Amino acid sequence: MVPEFWHGRSVFVTGHTGFKGGWLSLWLQRLGARVVGYSLPPPTTPSLYTVASVGDGMESLEGDVRDAERLSAALRRARPEVVFHLAAQAIVRTGYEEPVDTYATNVMGTCHLLEAVRQCPGVRAVVVVTSDKCYADTGDRTAHGEGDPMGGHDPYSSSKGCAELLTAAYRRSFLSAAGGDQQTVEVATARAGNVIGGGDWGDHRLVPDVVRAIAAGEPVRVRSPRAVRPWQHVVNPLSGYLLLAEELCGRGSEVADGWNFGPGEQDCRQVSWLVDRVVRRWGDGASWQSEPHPGFHETSFLMLDCAKARARLNWRPPVELETAVDWLVDWYRSHASAGDVRALTLEQIAETQRRLSG
């Protein structure tokens, strides 16, 4: 990652009011980029966007990626060189409850974004963020590589697989040098999941559920303690997204492809391990207990093979899981005591950059 690459560069971020989009927006601001965000209002109260004043250092446009005309107008107005597409319905359980909206946002929202890019001169690179759940669940407990088939048992997961296939089709048909349009735009997808960090208050997500239970003085209720997930601090995949965008601008079609950004095998842990670590770090009598599973299907084992990113992008996750847990607990405790969480977020980003440069 080359910090100087971003100074003064125009960047468009969809979903900037969300958890991951908020962290990315703050990182881009720290790098000196000119950031324009397009998103619905923050999805939770509280939200990282609000408590860390994410909007203070950027232009924020309110809009829905399902509104193709409004999204296209916003992109043309921003005239970015780099686009990060993070706007999404991101919860498995919500996918079961609202499948039509999930597909409308995750599939057609991605289509609207890529179609808008076709109509916007000057765009050089697009990173479409999907999920580790885009892969077909074979049940064989092996790490997913980028060449594995797309799939997904549930509406959320399959919507992410659809977004991957759609992006590949747009890249081949319209945006690459071999496509039909005169403008060449390099487009890649980034697959990561189970990110943790300060400022996530999403429903049906493990860390926010832990934080809410602790704040209420109740035991944390965990539905799948033996499930294995590729846990990582949010700065890890974000460092991959930023590096990927730089490489798209520098190496072009050589890296216009799908990429996994996940932790090493040692950080793929059971849910019970993560909850134990959080409650021990938190102290103050925090505890957890198992509860019956709600009955909908969830993959019991997820792991990503990131050898491709390591070999071809020279990417490594900068923050190990133990540190990630310490950082997120420190962040939420700071917020609970009315600390300056914007400053703390930027400090954690700065430390990540030091690790990347070291």
Image (cartoon, grey):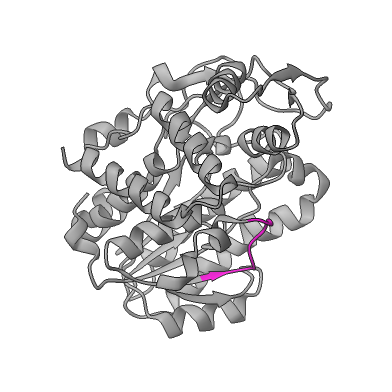
Q: Is residue 2 left or right of residue 194?
A: left
Task: Inspect this view and state whether residue 178 appears.
Answer: no
Q: Main secondary structure of the magenta part?
A: loop
Tell me which residue sits at (58%, 36%) in the image: 133
Tell me which residue sits at (54%, 15%) in the image: 141
Residue 339 or residue 174, whichever sits in front? 339
Residue 218, x across and y down, in percent: 77, 28
Number of numbered labels in the structure image: 0
Where is 221 relative to 234, above or below?
above
Residue 302, x across and y down, in percent: 55, 24
Where is 62 relative to 193, above or below?
below
Tell me which residue sits at (43%, 21%) in the image: 267
As for residue 39 lying within the magenta part, the answer is yes
Q: Which residues are magenta?
A: 38-46
Residue 233 or residue 139, whichever sits in front? 233
Q: Is residue 246 left or right of residue 228?
A: left
Task: Inspect this view and state whether residue 318 appears.
Answer: yes
Q: Is residue 220 left or right of residue 198?
A: right
Residue 42, x across and y down, in percent: 63, 62
Q: Quadrant of the C terminus?
A: top left
Residue 354, x across and y down, in percent: 22, 43
As for residue 73 lying within the magenta part, the answer is no
Say which quarter of the image contains residue 227: top right
Say which quarter of the image contains residue 118: bottom left
Where is 55 relative to 234, above or below?
below
